[in-house]
Image (cartoon, rainbow, N blue to C red):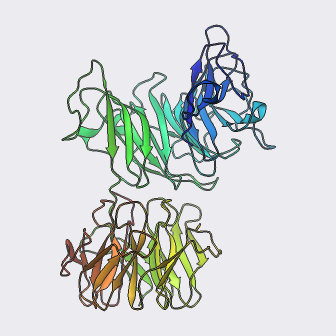
Amino acid sequence: NNHIYITGCTSSNNLPTKHAFQNNRQSLGDGDDAFIAVFDPSQERGNDTLLYSSYLGGEGEDIGRGIAVDNDRNAYVGGSTSSRELRTKSPSSLAPLQQNFQGGGFDGFVAKVDTESQGDSSLTYLTYFGGNINDRVEGVAVDSLQRAYITGASNSSASTFPLRNAFDATQTNGEAFVAKLNADGTALFYCTFLGGENGNTSEDGEEGLDIAIDTAGNAYVTGRTTAEASFPVGSLAPPFSTDLQGTAFVAKIAASVANNVTPALLYSTTFGGKSARSNSIAVDIRGNVYLTGTAGEDLPTTAGAFETEFNGGSFDGFAAKIAANNADTIGVYRPSTNQFLLRNSNSAGPADITISFGLAGDLPVTGDWDGNGIDDVGIFRPSTGQFQLRIPGLRPAVTIVTLSFGQAGDLPVAGDWNGDGIDTPGVLRPSLGQWFLTNGPNTNNTTPTVDLVVNFGQSGDIPLAGDWNGDALDTPGVFRTQTATFILSNDFFGTQDISFLFGISKFLAMAGDWDGDGIGSVGVFISSSGTNALNNTNSTGDGDGDLLFDFGQSGDLPLGGDWDGKP
């Protein structure tokens, strides 16, 4: 509702409170209390502008450092405290994650506040967060299931810090950390350090300063580090080149939906020069990352940027965008052996990945079934009207999800129909010229609901799905074999927005974002020669396309996807 949520600290004894769980300042002497307040800017003045306000603190020093809000207007506040008597709380019969102060000087804290309630009931949970020395929470994000994600800094020993499913459990002279709490603030999905061999032994040697999440629950963290080359890289991407590296960092951590799974560090890198510090982060639906912070004169600015020269005394501010730029690459399904053969570049060569999956008569389908940024394989079995989706993981190594969706005669397709970052099944029913699409979830042994019915196509058409206009939604498309025409729609109303000739009628069609520009385009597979012709624009071509190379053989069915998640 365009309300404004703020947190911070105050040494005032007369802060205006409203519906508060704590009406008075508790800190002693010159100490501060944290606070949370909510405003309605549509109101012109007076008490109607302030919707909610409460102190949050004890006798020590309490500072609210980060805030996030869910769809029910619950606010999640993170910060630091030296108070030993904060009123910890949970909404369940279980104790809050950490009931008691653990630190030497200060601990972090996380609180959930129901800003639509009043008095004591408005504090849903409050938990300390830390170990035996000094810890603070700097940034907070929250997902659609009201699970809080936090980042901050810690000097506590690994044995006392609340690590869980950590990919980094080593404390080295001050570490950033990342953690995911459950909705009640009583348990952790994961908590891990994030850092390298810090050369600085000060309290702030390494800090996580802000966090954002995407719709799939992947966490994006930014901050500062002194680890230099020892800062971890992650599994999906190399660091920036030496001339781009520095003391700011950005990292992406895979979604963790189970409480016994260690999330993967997908990528991380330093950037910005020797005095850079990245304070804030945002991420869009495509995984593009936006950063702001401060930096010195060695910040590597880009050509044509708003301001390319250093103007500050010690530092200037900076703004940066790091593009996801994940291109799709080719693959084929070989019915004769029931194998997927996938290549990680759009060029001739052997398969990089070979997966045996499916039975005779199955039709191939591919998609990002779990939102981790990597496309996986699946099949549609016409004889049973079922999809089987193959999802690699840590425990178990591979999960097979079976969904009852479709019927004999349907042609399978998959896409992200609602922009949540997760692909789900669909079918084209040629006899009706109708598409039936589901938004999931991809839960084993279920029958998903039909969320969208689209009148698009006719008998003989081959269905395709892609983001044809860059709006982060996959929408229908068809290859009309009779005329070798691609017909693409940018909506779910059956509108024919794009139509062009490409290839000839006997070619097989596919779709993918071949150049990583965020817009899906098409390609054709010449089965007789095993030749792939890919277009980077949705326009007429003679079959040569922008990329032309051999991969596959006669009888194969062509596929497109991002098989390794790498840019």
Percent coordinates x, y for residue 118 in the rendering: 75, 33
Q: Quadrant of the C terminus?
A: bottom left
Is 195 positioned to the left or the right of 482 in the image? right
Percent coordinates x, y for residue 442 in the rendering: 58, 68
Is 7 positioned to the left or the right of 96 in the image? left
For image coordinates 71% across by 21% down, the residue present is 84
Q: Quadrant of residue 394?
A: bottom right
Percent coordinates x, y for residue 304 in the rendering: 19, 41
Q: Quadrant of residue 51?
A: top right
**Relative to residue 481, is residue 355 depicted above or below?**
above
Work out whether residue 548 or residue 247 is closer to the camera in this orientation and state it: 548
**Relative to residue 224, is residue 433 depicted above or below?**
below
Percent coordinates x, y for residue 85 in the rendering: 73, 22
Q: Quadrant of residue 491?
A: bottom left
Work out whether residue 451 or residue 256 is closer to the camera in this orientation and state it: 451
Work out whether residue 74 or residue 256 is closer to the camera in this orientation and state it: 74
**Relative to residue 429, is residue 62 depicted above or below?**
above
Determine if residue 231 is in view.
Answer: no
For image coordinates 58% across by 68% down, the residue present is 440
Determine if residue 326 is in view.
Answer: yes
Work out whether residue 440 or residue 344 is closer to the camera in this orientation and state it: 440
Q: Residue furthest front?
A: 44
For image coordinates 71% across by 18% down, the residue present is 24
**Relative to residue 17, is residue 255 depicted above or below?**
below
